[in-house]
Image (cartoon, rainbow, N blue to C red):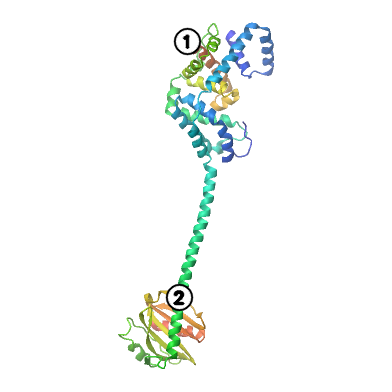
Amino acid sequence: MEVSSDRLTAAAFEELAMPLFDQLYNFAHWLTQERTEAEDLVQETYVKALRGLASFQPGTNFRAWMYRILRNTFLTSRTGLKAAATVPLDAEDAPEMPASSGTPESIFIEKSQRHLLQSAIEELPLHFREVLLLCEVEEMSYQEIADALAIPIGTVMSRLSRARKVLREVLQKKLGS
Amino acid sequence: MADEFAAKLDTYLDGELPASEMKSIDIHVRGCSSCAADVLSRVKMKHAVQSAGKRYQPSPEFRQRIQRQIASRPRAWVSRAWMTVSAVLAILLIAGLLNSYIGRERLQQEQAFSELADLHVAALASPNPVDVASSDRHTVKPWFQGKIPFTFNLPELQNTEFTLVGGRISYLEQAPGAELIFQVRKHYISVFIFQEQAAPALRSGSGVRKHVSFNYQTWNEGGLRYIAISDTTGEDISKLAQMLKAAAKS
């Protein structure tokens, strides 16, 4: 979703931004874990994006730009600050846990426990949850994720790998209990 | 090593490996049943996460609210357009009202001048055009004392072409005033003097104007409204007006 016009008009903004509404809301709800907060977050994102149209660089990824606004807005919110504070800054650099034997994901899928998976995603630390959702749900490329989260592409890869591993562990724990 | 390969498998399934590595893993997975099973499991997990991740739907009300909010700019344009239209309509309305007001003022003015013209003609047609007949200003002016609620000065007309014929009491809108009659050659000029508030319709610009076939000039001096009206030239009226103004200031 690259926009190449010299200047994004308000009308063009509406055309580009509204198709993202459902997915932005879904992502916002995953971040905030609460409907009203998610609505406030999405609303603020759209208002900020509309006001900051001039700061959008033509030729760059509009979807990633919108997600970046949403995420930055969330991170500065009370819930966002709290969520971010629960994860040590060096968590992603911590040594990875050895991969568990067996394939809990296949066991889980066989049991079709969708709600269990959702609950496992909820339990993921914020910076793992967001990278995983952007990759799997929004099907963003690594570069898009890097743009949306304003992190290097290498960090996207390592964070994504860690997120998947932690998700498997959480699932395994849930399936074992 | 196994972890490294597993991570690579995820990147492979995300379609983010370089083309050459994608191809080599493709080949490997086809020939390795263990890796093929792992890949299948990861694909299923990807789909499961994708499905589970699509969890929340915004309400239609919320969608409408945002839609309205971001569509506010075009609406602001429409609003501005409406404001412009409203402003134009307001201007037209004000212009209409002003026009109507001006029209009404003009009509009242026309009526007042018609009345004065009638008084002028009636006085001249009367067998006794003046109540005080004298060319002496010191006779005419005191005659009005006690008859009208104001006083005025009359100019010295010696060595001018104007002659004071005399004066009479006149009424405009039930207010008493003075009517002075002057002669210039064979023409008569009536000069009406009223208190300003008695003749609001006569508050118009300076200079000689024409009403029906009469020339007239009106001015304010010392709270009094002067109206000179005659069938003589505007120049004559203007000259007399200057003398009256000068006398009023003296």
Please tell me which residue lies in front, B21 or B218.
B218
Residue at 52%, 85% in the rendered image: B233
Name the secondary structure under disc 2.
helix
Seen in the image, is B15 located left or right of residue B220?
A: right
Residue at 48%, 13% in the rendered image: A170
Q: Is residue A50 above or below residue B52?
A: below
Q: In the image, residue B187 lies at what x, y percent?
A: 49, 90
| Nearer to us: label 2 or label 1 | 2
Residue at 45%, 28% in the rendered image: A35
Seen in the image, is A96 located left or right of residue B5?
A: left
Q: Is residue B240 above or below residue A56?
A: below
Please tell me which residue lies in front, A24 or A165.
A24
Looking at the rendered image, the quarter that the N terminus of chain A falls into is: top right
Question: Can residue B250 be seen at all in this image of the molecule?
Answer: no
In the rendered structure, which amino acid carries the disc numbered 2?
Answer: Gln
Name the secondary structure under disc 1.
helix
* Residue topped by disc 2: B109
Please tell me which residue lies in front, B55 or B81.
B55
C-alpha separation, residue under disc 2 versus residue under disc 1: 101 Å
Parent chain of label 1? A
Parent chain of label 2? B
Q: In the image, residue B83 lies at what x, y percent?
A: 51, 52
In the rendered structure, which amino acid carries the disc numbered 1?
Answer: Lys
Q: In the image, residue A73 lies at what x, y percent?
A: 48, 30
Q: What is the quadrant of residue B167 in the picture?
A: bottom left
Q: How crowded is mark 2: few (under 14 residues within 10 Å), some or many (20 or more)?
A: some
Q: In the rendered structure, are the residues bearing label 2 and label 1 in contact, judged by CB atoms less than 8 Å apart?
A: no
Question: Can residue B3 be seen at all in this image of the molecule?
Answer: yes
Q: In the rendering, which numbered label is found on residue A173?
A: 1
